[in-house]
Structures are given as C-alpha cells and as structure tokens.
Amino acid sequence: MTYKPFDLTGRVALVTGGNGGIGLGMAEALAQAGAGVEIWGTNAEKNARALEQLKAHGAKVNGRIVDVSKEENIVAGFNATLAEFGRVDACFANAGMSNRWKSFLDIGGEDYRRLMAINLDGVIWTLREACRHMKARAEAGDPGGSVVAVASLGALFGAARNQDYTATKAAVIAVTNGIAVEFARYGVRANSILPGWIATDMTGAAQENDAFTKNVIARVPMRRWGKPEEFGGIAVYLASDASSFHSGDSILLDGGYSKF
C-alpha cells in the first residue's frame, strides 16, 4: 500500500478568516490536498474571490458570512457548516485583527473590546464548537480530529504598543494546550501556529515602511517577509494522519527570526 499521509480526500476543514492572508493560504493547500473546505469571513466580496480560487482545485468549497466576535454567530455558523458538509475534521481558528496604538497608555475602549472579542473569545467559541462535534463523533465510534489556533510570534516576546493583541495570542496558546490534554481521549489533537512577519493586509503599513524593513525584516535570517501560502504545508500536515501523535505544540513559522 502506498503511504499517503497527506491525502485529505473525504475530510472537511473549516478555516475562519479564510478569505485572505494566512487563512486563504491554508485553505488553498487544504483544498489541493483533497479536503472539502469551508471559509468564514465578514466580507462577502472577499469570500467570493477566495471561493473562485479554491474551486479551481476541484474540491467542494463553501463560504459563509460569520462575525466571530459574537458567540451566537459561531454556534449558528458551525451548525450550518455541519449541515453543508456533514462533518468537520480539522478546524483552523485563524480570524483576527490588530489595533495600532500610539502607546500602551492609550489601550482601551471599544476597539480594545472588539479585538478581545475576535482574537480570544472568537477562538475559544470556534474551537469549543469543533470539540463538541468531534467528541460526539468519537462517542459514536468515529474518533479523531484536529483543532488549530493561529497565534503569533508576538505571544513570546515584548511588543510595544501592541500588548492587547499579543495578550490574546498568548492566551490562545494556553487554550489549545488545555484542549490537547482534555480531548486527547477522543482522538482530538490541538496545536497553535505562531507566524512571524508575514506579508498580509494586516501588516500592509509595515511593509511600506522603509525604516521597519531596515530595522526588523533585515533581522529575519531569511531576509524577507513570509508569504501566506507558506502556511499551506503546516495546515495540511496538522489536518492529516501525518500529525496523528502531534498535539499540544506551538509551532513557529518565522523564517528563523526568533533565533537571531
């Protein structure tokens, strides 16, 4: 028998924030590996563009408008995903945002609350619903599943003027570690991915800043920004049987930045 650990035929993956950036990079690779893919986003136009890309790979794909800042939206969205696909084998809680504060002294108010609602509450509720489904499946004789939270390299280091964002990313690492321990008995694996400096819409201002490029990107041993598509491999790995004993990990994809 040929060893095909990365073949995702017959499996279904959900990617929140899957209509752009790292989320779309992961969704595209998952579709190429044969998985059915559902993406969640809040922009209908971006969803439509992303779906056109994903459909080119021949897998079943679907897009849904889901604002993950509200618990009821996630519950309804996940149930709708199950109605569409019948199951979810891998769930990537990737939706997120950042604020641009002038100082830590300015952090607060509605922008702070919305960031917490999306980056932390939204991840917890998304992974909770995925675990609920995977536990029920296991109890019915079909164990297994993978849940993944997209955190950040910033969770491990000091990030001036960005303490609210990095706090959420440190928290979701703790969440996935707890899931890894609690749900292993149902065959569920939980890991977090920690991106470094990646060229996405979220980092658009920094990409156009010559001083940032000189002082920060020059310190990346690979001497460049990461690309969203470079998260496809880790997504397929974590959704596949190749990672069947890999759980409770925080996986860095930062071009070696954290080691220099």
Image: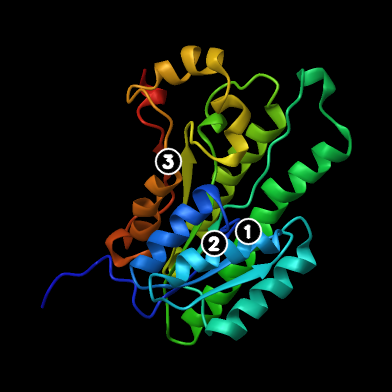
Q: Which residue is mark 2?
A: 50
Mark 1: give few (<14), some (14-19) or many (20+) Cα within 10 Å: some
Nearest the eye: 97 or 224: 224
- Does residue 80 appear left or right of residue 197 in this picture? right
Residue 236 visible from this viewpoint: yes
* Secondary structure state at the residue bearing disc 2: helix
Q: Residue at x 35, y 66 (%)?
A: 32
Q: Residue at x 60, y 40 (%)?
A: 201
Q: CA distance from mark 2 to mark 3?
A: 16 Å
Label 3 sits on residue: 227
Give the quarter of the figure containing the C terminus.
top left
Q: Amino acid at mark 2?
A: Ala
Give, as a three-letter code, the residue at label 3: Lys
Marks 3 and 2: in contact by CB < 8 Å? no
| Disc sitting over residue 46 in the figure | 1
Residue count near mark 2 (Cα–Cα under 10 Å), binned few <14, some 14–19, many ≥20: many
Hey, what amino acid is under mark 1?
A: Lys
- Say which quarter of the image contains residue 237: bottom left
